Image (tube, rainbow, N blue to C red):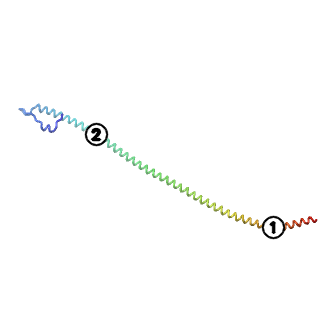
Amino acid sequence: MTVSKIDLLNKQFSRGVFGYSRMEVEQFLLELAEVLGESADAQKSMRKKIKQMEQSLKEYRQRDETLRDTLMSTQKMVDDLKVAATREAQLILDEARAKADSTVQKGHNRLAQIHEEIEDLKRRRVQFEVQLKGLLKSHLEMLEMSDPEKNKVEELESKLMYLKKVD
């Protein structure tokens, strides 16, 4: 049963000798007490429900805040990891470039050394050829010089042979 404000304001009691009808007033008060009791119970139930919902809302907000904090922490950690990984990758690249530069420099140095060795060998070859030509020339000259002597030796041998025959 419900009693509204309008019902209360429009309620008319019948009049008797000593005022309003006592039974009607008492009946109305009982009805009103029942409605107020139900209303108080409903209000109490609603307040309890509101407290529960406020508690649930508080828990959800705490969870939301915790999740937000966790998400922010995770994002910061991911960002830090990205920065660290980028830094480490740069260090690895720098080290690789340094090794590559060193290897290239060693290759250039070795190439220069090989060119120097080739040039040295060419100089030695030219020197050897010049010395060999000089030696061959001097031997040829010696051989040519010995030809007149050779002729003398042959003349002497032929004279000797003649003398042996005559004897």
Q: Tell me which residue sits at (49%, 53%) in the image.
A: 93
Could you tell me if the residues under marks 2 and 1 are in contact, i.e. CB atoms within 8 Å? no
Circle 1 sits in a helix, a strand or a loop, which is it? helix
Sequence-first tag of 2 and 1: 2
State the quadrant of the C terminus.
bottom right
Image position, residue 95 (x, y; %): 51, 54
Which mark's residue is nearer the viewer, 2 or 1? 1
Image position, residue 53 (x, y; %): 28, 39
Residue at the limit of the structure toward the top, as seen here:
23
Circle 2 sits in a helix, a strand or a loop, which is it? helix
Image position, residue 142 (x, y; %): 78, 67
Give the residue type at disc 1.
Asp
Give the residue type at disc 2.
Met
Image position, residue 82 (x, y; %): 43, 50
Count all numbered tags in the image, as a single digit. 2
Mark 2, residue position? 53
Where 51 falls versus 129 (above or below)?
above
